[in-house]
Image (cartoon, helix red, strand yellow):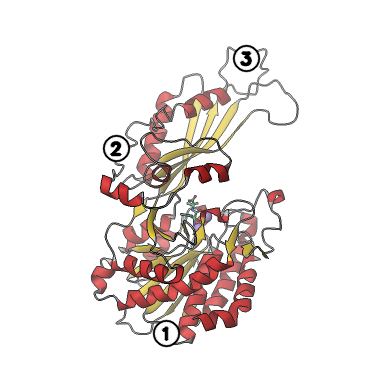
Amino acid sequence: MQNYLNDNRGKIIEELFDLLRIPSISADSARKQDVSRCAETIKGLLIKAGLEQVEVLQTGGHPVVYGQKIIDPELPTVLVYGHYDVQPPDPLDLWTTPPFEPEIRDGKIYARGASDDKGQLFIHVKAIEQMVQTGSLPCNVKLIAEGEEEVGSTHLGNFLKEHREKIAADIVLVSDTGMISLDEPSIMTGLRGLSYIEMEVAGANRDLHSGLYGGAVANPAQVLSTLIASLINDAGRITIPGFYDDVEELSSAERHQLAQAPFDLDRYKQTLDIAEVTGEAGYSVMERVGIRPSLDVNGIWSGYTGEGAKTVLPAKAFAKISMRLVPNQSSPQISQLFIDHIKGITPKTVKVTVTPHHGGEPWCIQDDLPAYRAACRAVREVFGKEPVPVRGGGSIPVVALFEAELGLKTILLGFGLDSDAIHSPNEHFGLINLFKGIETVPLFYKYFAESPDLRTLCGEKV
Ligand code: BES
Ligand code: MN
Ligand code: MN
């Protein structure tokens, strides 16, 4: 392994750079060609890695790239999932070097997608290449690379149904998350779900003079602010009736276990430059983002925002609101509760329109899977320390879909760091993370394939 890495370091970095140069921004329709070009590039990488039946499969949206290497149909199969689409790079002026011109500084690769998720997907491509080349692949492997994760994986549910046979496997392996730090390795055992809502509050039929009408006609910007402010109470609880009804309550033993993950509140506040944290009373910061739901305004706009002062009473106000969900909340149900509640509390002075966007279901590892233990062992061997379990606050909607549609369990073997600035300017990924990742993945395969009983290893086989 070490030899392979030492001999190929330069080439590996160059190939990843080629991938990072493609602006595969799934949210931007003007980039559709680039997204397709990125899929073709991945196809080339998979062929080079020694995968077979490599193809670019069309979906209702951006394509999925597929490849497989079946060494023996009797052996277990690992299904690797990753995404090659990226978030929009703006605001561009905050990048030290342009987002699609990768550069190494202080041992880190700076580029949009370096960590989320091209760099981490690439880890698997190189790990597979190395195992195929050295004849050490101990089981079958299939890989799918998606181009729509950052826009909600809307077509992936259908894709899984349509290609059920093709992607049949025993376990899913995903590197699209992070660990606490290189010295404190961790493995994510949960992801939050998502409900995303857009709201429009409309007042009078046109913008008004705020002197002639102010005080008598409702101001949509103010009504919207009041509505939003009422959604979280002084104890940090979300006030939507029924919101917490299905929330999984963890036992004190489970909470104690999760509290083993190191966390330094002062450093947390310091790195974010905030004087105090916020959130639901009775829960730690890690719990607030890991095992408790949350509600956030992602965008809010109305009225005059240009230079100087314009006296205007705006006709409309808008907001985009996300709710992060935890097991056993259901995304469509929570979206509906939100809509009903907002309609119920909106005063007669305005009209409100509430539209749900994409969502995703929460997920957590429910059993003590031997495949999880195989992942822990691989991480321990490379990072020199037993990884701790952490519930992640982000969302990867497909992970719950794998379980619901195909009955497949997932292992989140993430190599990113919270400090990688994913979705932000100057996203980066450490070369150490990259190369340790390429070292860790083959060990997972080894220990996974060695596990004594495959059925208990990964839950029910499809
Ligand atoms: N890879 C992230 C999710 C993630 C990152 C989970 C780090 C845990 C730790 C993924 O690409 C992402 O950004 N997901 C979106 C959801 C999607 C529906 C747009 C998110 O969490 O906002
Ligand atoms: Mn991602
Ligand atoms: Mn992302």
Amino acid type of the residue tagged 2 in the rendering: Asp
Q: Is residue 257 above or below residue 80?
A: above
Could you tell me if residue 383 is visible in this image? Answer: yes
Is disc 1 placed on a helix, strand or loop? loop
Q: Nearer the viewer, mark 1 or mark 2?
A: 1
Q: Is residue 338 left or right of residue 455?
A: right
Residue tagged 2? 245
Left or right: 53 as drawn, with respect to 315: left
- Distance from disc 3 to disc 2, alpha carbons, whole Å, reads 41 Å
Q: Residue at x 41, y 75 (%)?
A: 443
Mark pair 1, 2: CA separation: 49 Å
Respond yes or no on whether mark 1 lies under 8 Å from ligand 2: no
Viewer-nearest of discs 3 and 1: 1
Position in image of residue 401 (x %, y %) = 37, 58
Residue 104 percent coordinates (x, y):
66, 65
Q: Nearer the viewer, residue 15 or 180?
A: 180
Question: Quarter of the image holding residue 5?
Answer: bottom right
Dot label at residue 214: 3
Label 1 belongs to which residue? 136
Which mark, residue 151?
Answer: none
Number of marks present in the image shown: 3
Question: What is the x, y in percent for residue 144?
Answer: 46, 69
Q: Amino acid at mark 1?
A: Ser
Quarter the C terminus occupies: bottom left
Percent of width and height locating residue 304: 68, 28
Q: Residues within 10 Å of mark 3 (few under 14, many from 20)?
A: some
User: Hey, which quadrant is residue 412 in on the image?
Assistant: bottom left
Image position of 406 (left or right of 11): left
